Image (cartoon, coloured by chain):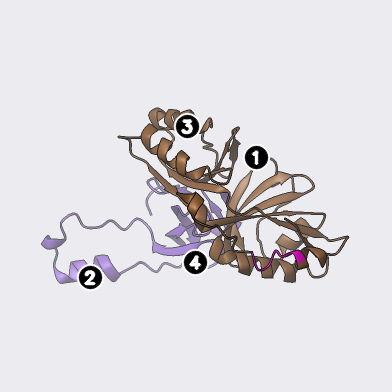
Chain colours: A brown, B purple
């Protein structure tokens, strides 16, 4: 179904070739949009073995039950959102089949599976000034001793609701944001990173 | 700015939370049996203590769970945070 629909990143007018060429060489942060990543909102009771077994069967993941943690599988990644809700994030285009197989595997149970791929977009932010820039609009302590590997958090960045995920110690952090907020977040990042320089890349 | 401990997510800034008024107000089991005055009391009347106050908060920008807190209305100091359905620490007040 999705093959016949042309997908367009909400940042298509921001992340242009001209913008890449204008990027400073020694930028404090580099922003890399990751549009179209499959994103499924999954709800269910993690204390119910039938539910967790079915999800593991489809995604290969044991759903994380520790607040604000991430579980990685080969094809899917699960982010804890609340005690009975997760995002399943996978490769672009994987959402339709996954929703179907999850619904089949969970049939008869108390659950919810919703494809929210087109409602979300992802920005990867890396570079030496990543934490300094985000600190201007985010009240979370993103220092590695507080926010390290395997962690994610829902919070606000300058009023925009985001899910932040730790990627690596470059540092690289990933922001999942509703697509209607993506343009605002990009413009805010450009402003916040003005003193350090912001590069954009594919 | 208050610093609030979500029972699920831990310490977060006040800007992530919403306030939900007094906690532990039980909906009457049979509203039809109540007089208008009793129904109005359930709907509108709240304690307004000077000191410890048990109240509801919601972690709007985070896990979106409601929880309870005990806060001193004079000093704004939080005494306790506990999940919905849990007994308030320190017993009945």
In 3D space, how far apart are the residues under numbered discs 4 and 3 (Cα atoms)? 50 Å
Question: Do dots 1 and 3 share one subunit?
Answer: yes
Discs 4, 2 touching: Cβ within 8 Å: no
Q: Residue at x 77, y 49 (%)?
A: A171
In 3D space, how far apart are the residues under numbered discs 1 and 3 (Cα atoms)? 21 Å
Magenta residues span A12-17
Asked if residue A47 is positioned above or below residue A40 in the image, the reply reads above
Does residue A150 appear left or right of residue A49 in this picture? right
Residue B73 is tagged as 4
Among numbered discs 4 and 2, the one appearing first in the sequence: 2
Q: Residues within 10 Å of mark 3 (few under 14, many from 20)?
A: some
Q: Residue at x 51, y 37 (%)?
A: A65
Question: Do dots 4 and 3 share one subunit?
Answer: no
**Disc 1 vs disc 2: which is toward the camera?**
1
Does residue A195 appear left or right of residue A52 in this picture? right
Question: Do dots 1 and 4 share one subunit?
Answer: no
Q: Position of residue A162 (x, y in %)?
A: 58, 57
Host chain of mark 1: A
In 3D space, how far apart are the residues under numbered discs 3 and 2 (Cα atoms)? 52 Å
């Amino acid at each position: 179904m999705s093959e016949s629909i042309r997908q367009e990143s909400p940042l298509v007018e921001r992340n242009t070739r001209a913008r890449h060429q204008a990027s400073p060489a020694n930028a404090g942060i580099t922003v890399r949009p990751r549009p179209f990543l499959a994103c499924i909102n999954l709800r269910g009771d993690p204390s119910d073995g039938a539910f967790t077994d079915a999800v593991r069967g489809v995604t290969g993941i044991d759903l994380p039950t520790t607040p604000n943690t991430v579980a990685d599988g080969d094809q899917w990644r699960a982010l804890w959102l609340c005690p009975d809700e997760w995002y399943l994030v996978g490769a672009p285009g994987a959402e339709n089949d996954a929703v179907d197989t999850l619904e089949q595997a969970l049939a008869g149970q108390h659950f919810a599976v919703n494809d929210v791929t087109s409602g979300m977009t992802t920005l990867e932010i890396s570079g030496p000034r990543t934490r300094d820039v985000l600190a201007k609009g985010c009240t979370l302590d993103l220092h590695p001793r507080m926010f390290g590997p395997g962690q994610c958090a829902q919070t606000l960045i300058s009023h925009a609701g985001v899910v932040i995920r730790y990627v690596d110690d470059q540092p690289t952090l990933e922001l999942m944001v509703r697509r209607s907020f993506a343009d605002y977040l990009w413009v805010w990042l450009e402003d916040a990173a003005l003193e350090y320089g912001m590069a954009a890349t594919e | 700015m208050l610093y609030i401990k979500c029972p699920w997510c831990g310490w977060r800034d006040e800007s992530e939370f919403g306030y939900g008024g007094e906690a532990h107000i039980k909906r009457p089991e049979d509203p039809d049996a109540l007089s208008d005055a009793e129904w109005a009391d359930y709907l509108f009347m709240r304690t307004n203590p000077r000191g410890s106050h048990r109240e509801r908060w919601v972690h709007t920008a985070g896990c979106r769970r409601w929880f309870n807190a005990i806060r001193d209305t004079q000093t704004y100091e939080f005494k306790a945070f506990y999940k919905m359905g849990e007994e308030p620490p320190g017993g009945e007040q």
